[in-house]
Amino acid sequence: MYLERFTSDLCLEKPSDVQHYSAMYDHLQARALTPDSSRDFLTDTTKSYIDAAIEP
């Protein structure tokens, strides 16, 4: 597991460390929006900011 951080990087090789990050990645992937839902979310969010900037 390679971790790139702000001031350094780290390579983890212990199976328990790799398993921990693999499980975390699987959880994030399961919770992620679909590509279409991501696009819709970004479009709606952008429109909200534009509308708020236009309103007095």
Image (tube, grey):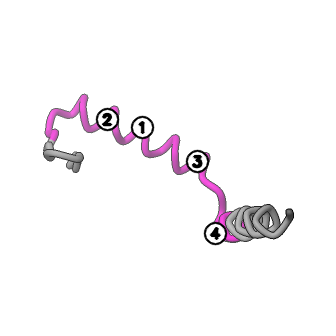
Q: Which sits earlier in the primary sequence, circle 3 or circle 4? A: 3
Local crowd at mark 2 within 10 Å, few (<14), some, or many (≥20)? few
Residue wearing tag 1: 23
Q: Give how far across and how far down residue 12 sits, in percent.
A: 16, 39
Q: Is residue 53 above or below residue 4?
A: below
Q: Main secondary structure of the magenta part?
A: helix
**The image quarter in which residue 7 lies:** top left
Q: Is residue 32 above or below residue 41?
A: above
Do the residues under discs 2 and 1 have CB atoms within 8 angstroms?
A: yes
Q: Which mark is residue 19?
A: 2
Residue wearing tag 3: 30
Q: Which type of secondary structure does the marked residue at label 3 adopt?
A: helix
Q: Which type of secondary structure does the marked residue at label 4 adopt?
A: helix
Q: Nearer the viewer, residue 6 or 33?
A: 6
Q: Which sits earlier in the primary sequence, circle 3 or circle 2? A: 2
Q: Which sits earlier in the primary sequence, circle 2 or circle 4? A: 2
Indicate the amino acid at tag 4: Pro
Indicate the amino acid at tag 3: Ala
**49 relative to 20 in the view: left or right:** right
Q: Which mark is residue 35?
A: 4
